[in-house]
Image (spheres, rainbow, N blue to C red):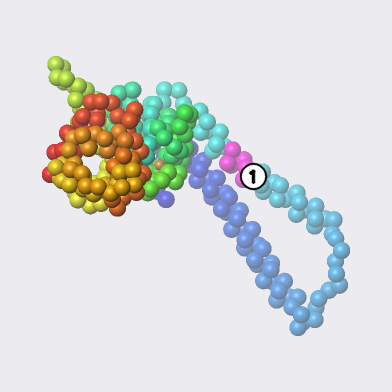
Amino acid sequence: MRRAVTGLGHGTDNAFLVIAGICVILFLLIIGLTAYFVLRYRRSKGEVPEDIHGNALLETAWTILPIFIVLYMFYYGWLGYDARRKAPEGALTVKANGQMWAWSFEYDGAVMSDRLVVPVGRPVRVVLSSSDIIHSLYVPAFRIKQDAVPGLERMVWFTADKTGEYDLFCTEYCGTGHSQMLSKAVVMKEAEFTAWLAGTAAANRPSPGAEERPSGADLFKAKGCSACHTTDGRPLVGPTLKAIFGKKVRVSTAGKEREVEIDEEYLRRSELDPATDVVVGFPPIMPPQKGVLKEEELNALVEYIKGLK
Ligand code: CUA
């Protein structure tokens, strides 16, 4: 698999190659000897020697040798593990948060992104948390994989040495939307990264004088809505939100089916407490947003959904 990191990435690849190499050698040795003995001492040749009852030299050898082989593998694993425990001083810190079913990345406590954007050649320290259950951040090209655990802060770091876009996964099964909890890690040149950070910060910040109003379209992605709901008419884990405002839908309310018209009231209720009215044909799995969304975020999302034609 393509690699976009040095240092730690070499550690991972070395440990993998050493262990895989030893396994291949042992496999060939064991299968080879088995095949040889089957042929050499087959019954029809009548060459079966008398029973052997123990051989001190052989037994000592096959006890001591594997100990060294296993320690050798451990040594390579340890090298990689030890290097990962502490990020270098001056590393760029990015906060990553997992929730059902999207990642969000925070820079300088303010700039939010749904992609992990990093500069090339600079160590990056990712501090992981989760809003609900255990997720796991996995970027194969960076050779990193770390759980995001609710109530705990975990850390993982890397230095990317090739610009480009790399796959980023959730690799801990976290429910129906798990397979769609995908994003990208983007490695940019330092200058590009600085510009991106400033641009995203400016886009997130309300212009002076204007009231603070987060964009509904951005929230829709950042809050993970788009993992389950499309805006183009395709049903996903949840129903599509295309042109639903004013429509009538069949919902299940406390086990009874009924028809409701989608108005503002319904949209608000469905976000804060989605289990109240569940659209028929879809599982009741949406995480409630009560206490998660701020009032202005809720308003922006409702406005956004109303405007989806
Ligand atoms: Cu989050 Cu799987």
Q: Main secondary structure of the magenta part?
A: helix
Q: Residue at x 18, y 43 (%)?
A: 261
Q: Residues within 10 Å of mark 1 (few under 14, many from 20)?
A: some
Q: Quadrant of residue 286?
A: top left
Q: Amino acid at mark 1?
A: Tyr
Towards the viewer: 229 or 115? 229
* Ligand 1 image position (quadrant): top left
Say whether residue 123 is left or right of residue 242: right
Residue range highlighted in magenta:
73-78
Q: Residue at x 15, y 42 (%)?
A: 245
Q: Is residue 163 shown to the viewer in this render?
A: no
Kindly tell me whether mark 1's CB lies below 8 Å from ligand 1. Answer: no
Q: Residue at x 42, y 50 (%)?
A: 1
Say which element carries label 1.
helix
The correct choice, above or below, for 173 with respect to 155 in the image is below
Where does residue 152 sit, x and y in percent of width and height?
A: 48, 29
Where does residue 103 sit, x and y in percent of width and height?
A: 35, 37
Q: Look at mark 1 in the image and give the residue it sits on.
A: 72
Towards the viewer: 236 or 13? 236
Where does residue 210 sit, x and y in percent of width and height?
A: 14, 19
Q: Is residue 5 magenta?
A: no
Q: Is residue 57 shown to the viewer in this render?
A: yes
The correct choice, above or below, for 67 with respect to 219 in the image is below
Towards the viewer: 148 or 302? 302
Image quadrant holding the C terminus, namely: top left
Q: Quadrant of residue 122?
A: top left
The extreme bottom residue here reads: 44
Where does residue 284 sit, x and y in percent of width and height?
A: 35, 45
Say whether residue 80 is left or right of residue 231: right
The correct choice, above or below, for 172 with respect to 116 in the image is below
